Image: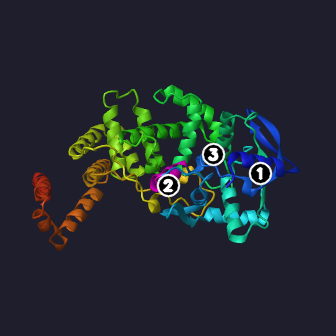
Amino acid sequence: MLNSAERAHRIEQEKLTTDDKARLWVQDQWRNYDVYRVPVDTLLLNVDNRRFRAERMWAEAHLGRPLDPENNPADELSIESLLLDTSHRVEGDRIVGKPTGSSEALKKDWIRRKQGSPLWIRPDGTVRNGNRRLSMIKRLQREEGADGWGWVDVIILPISKINEATLLEMEQKEQLTEDFKVRYNDIDYLLALREAADNRGIEWYDPESIESVAGVLQNMAEKSKNEVQRDLYAVKYMDIFLDESGHAGQYHKVLKTLERFRDIGRMMQQIEGQYPLEEAEILQTLFAAVRAGKGHLVIRDMRTMFKKDKPRFDRLSAAILEAESGWEPDGPSLSDPEPSALLENDTGDEELDADSEEEGPGPEVENYPKDDVSSAIDLAIDSFKSSRQDNVVKVLQEVCNRLEALGDRERLSAALASDDGALVRQSLTKVLQWADDNRQLTDRLD
């Protein structure tokens, strides 16, 4: 394999001038750049590509070493797979998967229309924009031979004229607003947004700073200011969740949780400063829902409960605290996600964006009382929704349906004889007491 100096030398010696120029938005103005043709084998996939940072963390954790495509051919193949495939797994010393619908569409489009726009590269051949396309070409070379796939169009961006900070902003603008390319994984999108915010000096615990930076980034992300602000709060609370779990910065452990943390961010944004003595407890109640595997719609129900029936939400917080009382995490608490569940990032629709990302099962928390916490949340939400139901007939019919279900196959008798018999008896006593207290209502009708 070629080293950096060897790649740079070959590119300089072998590049072919074309008559084309590419127009790029650089430092707040449009600039024209010459387009060259260079050999594919002089180009290096960028291991720091922001498109797959969370997946890269997962891959490196399972391979037990950093990915190094410059010195290890197997790692170049692993990066290709992370960019083009889904259902990833470790096979020997590399990551493999199966091609996604979007990568197959990209290949067919290239074969039909050839290269649409040039890749962006550094003088040493490191690709800074166009890694998926380069991965597809390298795979085609192996499958069909180099004939017809040996050269690509590039723009060469020297460090002396475009420094790393400028190139980072160009990459973020290009990749966050892309069209035919595959959409960002939810976490990778947030990390790109987070990096852009950090570069603009955001103060994560200052609401005014978050709002100000959201206004600056809205054009880059091509979203409204409110949408960017919402996503910045999602980043903030995802970071807090990982830090509290003993996995700071290990974003691969929370893949496909964007909507959960968006809803947490929405709620915490509303209560910041309003409930200073309860803020930490409220946040832990929401984090408990994440640890219990609840989806964003459940978290949204909890947010509605807080706004419309805070005493009930407070009782839920107390119930969760009691359920968690025996859980004492000893060091990091999140397990590595299953690749089949969390790296499945293709739906066959290339037009979906980060907002449409399919929700995953949530992080797996070691020794967490998941069932007890989940049950407490379900009961609180069910109770809340019933309390908001004005149709008494419907509520009573729902009660009858559930009581009838308990009579099937002597379920109630079996439950009373189980290890949870005391809790069953306690609940049954409440039901019978309620019936006795209201029996007089029907007696009057007689």
Identified by mark 3, the residue type is: Leu
Residue 176, label in figure: 3
Label located before the other in sequence (3 or 1): 1
Q: Nearer the viewer, residue 331 or 406?
A: 331
Residue 59, label in figure: 2
Label located before the other in sequence (2 or 1): 2
Was residue 232 drawn as part of the magenta stretch in this picture? no
Nearest to the eye among marks 3 and 1: give it: 1
Was residue 57 drawn as part of the magenta stretch in this picture? yes
**For numbered disc 2, what is the local secondary structure?**
helix
Identified by mark 1, the residue type is: Pro
Nearest to the eye among marks 2 and 1: give it: 2
Q: Identify the residue under disc 1.
A: 118
Position of 315 relative to 59 (above/below)? above
Label located before the other in sequence (3 or 2): 2
Q: Main secondary structure of the magenta part?
A: helix
Residue 302, label in figure: none
- Quadrant in which residue 133 is drawn: bottom right
| Outermost residue toward the right in this view | 19
> In this rendering, does residue 127 appear at all?
no
The N terminus lies in quadrant: bottom right
**For numbered disc 1, what is the local secondary structure?**
loop
Q: Which residues are magenta?
A: 53-64
Q: Nearer the viewer, residue 341 or 215?
A: 341
Q: Residue at x 81, y 37 (%)?
A: 31
Residue 88 left/right relative to 351: left
